[in-house]
Amino acid sequence: MLSALLLIPFIGGLALLLLPSSLPPTRMRAIAIVFLTLQLLLAVALLIPFDPANGGPQLQESFSWISSIGLDYRLAVDGLSLPLVLINAALTLVSAICTRQISQRPRLYFSMLLLISGAVNGAFLADNLLLFVIFYELELIPLWLLIAVWGGANRAYASTKFLIFTAISGFLILAAFLGLAFVNGSVNFDITPALTDQLPVVTQLVLLITLLIGFGIKIPLAPFHVWLPDAHTQASTPVSVMLAGVLLKLGTYGLIRFCLGLFPDVWPLIAPSLAIWAAISVLYGSLAAIAQRDMKRMVAFSSVGHMGYVLLAVAAATPTALLGAVFQMVSHGVISALLFLLVGIVYRKTGTRDLEVLRGLLNPERGLPFTGTLMILGVMASAGLPGMAGFISEFLVFRGSIQAFPLATLLCIVGSGLTAVYFLLLVNRAFFGRLAVTPKTDPIEDGRLDVQLLPVAPRETVPALALALSVIGIGILPSGLARISDSATQLLSQLHGGLG
């Protein structure tokens, strides 16, 4: 089953590339949706044989590949990777459904989307360090193409910056894994904590810090975040959904699986510094978001802050905090995807994302009332309103970290409060007041009472509505996700020394 999660999107991408270029874009989109639907159904089917009581790797598949260099084909799933595989399948399908205006190279576009999804599945399921690096790097060029070819006016600059930073991230991760093998005098790249048991403390710290920087770029954490706002601003809406909802989770997943998982002996030595780093990243991301005028850049900077909660949880490494980290990865994926979809709708209907220009979009007759309603729900979820996904994830993170790092946790709670501030600014400026905007389809004077925005078609809001219902569902019934991941986070904390 695990190999099929790789083969389905890879075969779909290859099939699209082999199709004749004369095929209409709508037909190519339909083919991509079929393959992505199959992927989602298979990911959901993993829940049937999966045993939540078993915190270790399950459904393992392996065969010898290039044993001389330690590269073996080994796949496995556990309570940490399964939720992320489900999120990847769901959000890639949402991205394809929301792609409706691709006239330039549609074959390449949809094939790259499928290739990214397959590579992400491979990274989450890889049970060999070198195999993880291969899949981690495999999504780099396709995403670069999605930004460079179908992005905004400054797409060349944004895509190049993304390429450079992500390439550095992959290089550092590979260097740490190769260094680990070199100092052990072994070509065994299987994932196991025993690899580091006999290493000197200084050597472990050097390797761990290298990995932390590599994954910190991908997450991204301040000050390695500088590629993210430009990438989001220039990327199309479906690509932003993939970037924020799925690809950033490769960094947080690596943080838990490899940084915490491979270096249990020295983790307590560096954990206090990581908690401080988390607090700085959370506060910086929140304050930077407050300063933004572009709605998309504001949502992008919010990711910097919200990913800092995961670092805080991993620093504490208590069972509750690690479970909160899983919840935070899932909830951020769904919430950020929802917000980017809604920002995309606003931009298509008005031609701008400038908070100094937009006013009164919640107008029930001439504005975007349903879009505004979903936006209010999304920002409340991101701000941690009880009953929604953001609340349960932040509560678990803070509850699991407060005993180990009280000051850092309190600063992160302040950052959570700032989330309400900048999203309140967004909603208040763009959706309340007198309708005042310059529509793309009918440029008129700002502030005139006869502003009339084009209605939003149901097909544009259905994906956003589905994500909004997911946000509420996770918040009201968190037991399903907790049941999947609890044993894995308990085992990880026990094996690697929770600090609480």
Image: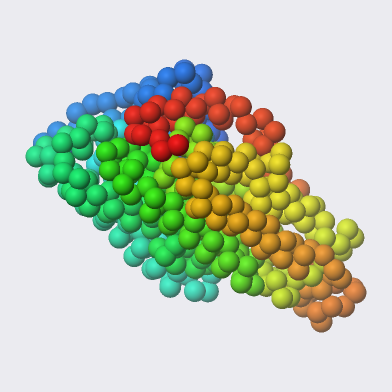
**Looking at the picture, how far across and down is residue 372, in whole percent?**
77, 56
Residue closer to the observer: 199 or 134: 199
Nearest to the observer: residue 116 or residue 85: 85
Q: Is residue 374 left or right of residue 212?
A: right
Instruction: Give the side of residue 266 with respect to residue 319, left or right.
Output: left
Residue 370 percent location from the top left of the image: 80, 52
Q: Is residue 269 above or below residue 349?
A: above
In the depicted structure, whether residue 53 falls above or below residue 374: above
| Quadrant hosting residue 129 | top left
Image quarter of the C terminus: top left
Residue drawn at x 19%, y 28% as measured from the top left: 64
* Image spot of residue 155 (x, y percent): 47, 70
Spot occupied by residue 110 in the image (x, y as percentages of width and height): 49, 50
Q: Going by the image, does 469 lie left or right of 95? A: right
For residue 495, which quarter of the picture?
A: top left
Looking at the picture, does residue 286 appear above or below residue 42? Answer: below
Considering every residue shown, the one lying at the far left of the view is 185
Residue for point 48% across, 21% down = 52
Question: Does the image show residue 19?
Answer: no
Is any part of residue 231 visible from this angle? Answer: yes
Check the picture and name the quadrant holding the N terminus: top left
Decide if residue 347 is on the left or right side of residue 444. Answer: left
